[in-house]
Amino acid sequence: MKVLLFNGSPHKNGCTYTALEEIAKTLKEEGIDSEIYQIGIKPIGACRACGACGKLGRCVIDDAVNSFLDYAKDFDGFIFGSPVHYASACGGITAFLDRAFFTAFHSGRGDIFRHKPGAAIASARRSGTTATLDQLNKYFTITEMPIVSGRYWNMVHGHTPDEVKQDLEGLQNMRILARNFAWHLKCREAGENAGISLPKEEEIVFTNFIRN
């Protein structure tokens, strides 16, 4: 079993990375492999709502989002991390995940994420974390992904990685989240081994609220 830890920060080894690293160490102790995916600093275009992904099987904007989807399919769970920018998730991760989830669904590759556990973490100097977590958790709730929690909101505080390391409560919650995540994966594996199948899928119905 392997978990993808998504670092949505433009800083490769910053505060968000420090929190994800704590999660990675704890997952390893639980026998779960993980890998930190760095979003990088290259521009990520916003979704154009063109619907071309439904015909092409991939996003019409040919950048890291397409390669990420090809890569992500082999992971068993996802933890998305973002710094707080203006009381919400940073622009890079927002544009990236909007397109990744939209493309996966409309290109018929929803199983990249569907029914796999997800969790979100946020890092901030001071505030805006709960709004960021609410934003990121919506990607899971519209994709049939079980949300794994810690014992508090999944956040760390600090302006630098060294300051984050002083947030003992925040780092403890990263460890608790990691153990809960590992437990969920092991339970799912045990269920599959026992012959418990995934939930039955229905054909999706779209209802427009405005009618002529």
Image: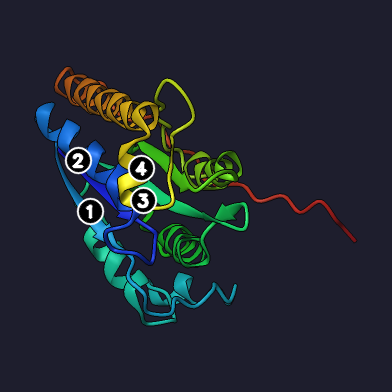
Q: Residue at x 32, y 26 (%)?
A: 172
In front: label 3 or label 1: 3
In front: label 3 or label 2: 3
Q: Residue at x 51, y 47 (%)?
A: 136
Q: Tell me the CA gap for discs 2 and 4.
A: 16 Å
Q: Amino acid at mark 4?
A: Val
Q: Residues within 10 Å of mark 1 (few under 14, many from 20)?
A: some
Name the quadrant containing residue 56. bottom left
Q: Considering the numbered disc 3 on the image, is that residue within a helix, a strand or a loop?
A: helix
As drawn, is 107 to the left or to the right of 162?
Answer: right
In front: label 2 or label 4: 4
Residue 9, image x and y in percent?
A: 39, 60
- Depth check: give the residue in front, 132 or 108: 132
Q: Which residue is mark 3?
A: 16
How has the structure been colored for display? rainbow
Q: Amino acid at mark 2?
A: Ala
Contact (Cβ within 8 Å) of mark 3 with mark 1 = no
Q: Tell me the CA gap for discs 3 and 2.
A: 12 Å
The tally of labels here is 4
Q: Which residue is mark 1?
A: 36
Residue 206, image x and y in percent?
A: 65, 51
Q: Considering the numbered disc 4 on the image, is that residue within a helix, a strand or a loop?
A: helix
In front: label 4 or label 3: 4
Task: Looking at the image, tell me whether mark 4 or mark 3 is earlier in sequence order.
Answer: 3
Residue 74, image x and y in percent?
A: 19, 51
Q: Tell me the CA gap for discs 4 and 3.
A: 9 Å
Residue 78 appearing in the image: no
Q: Which residue is mark 2?
A: 24
Label drawn at residue 164: 4
Contact (Cβ within 8 Å) of mark 2 with mark 1 = yes
Contact (Cβ within 8 Å) of mark 4 with mark 3 = no
Q: Tell me the CA gap for discs 3 and 1.
A: 11 Å
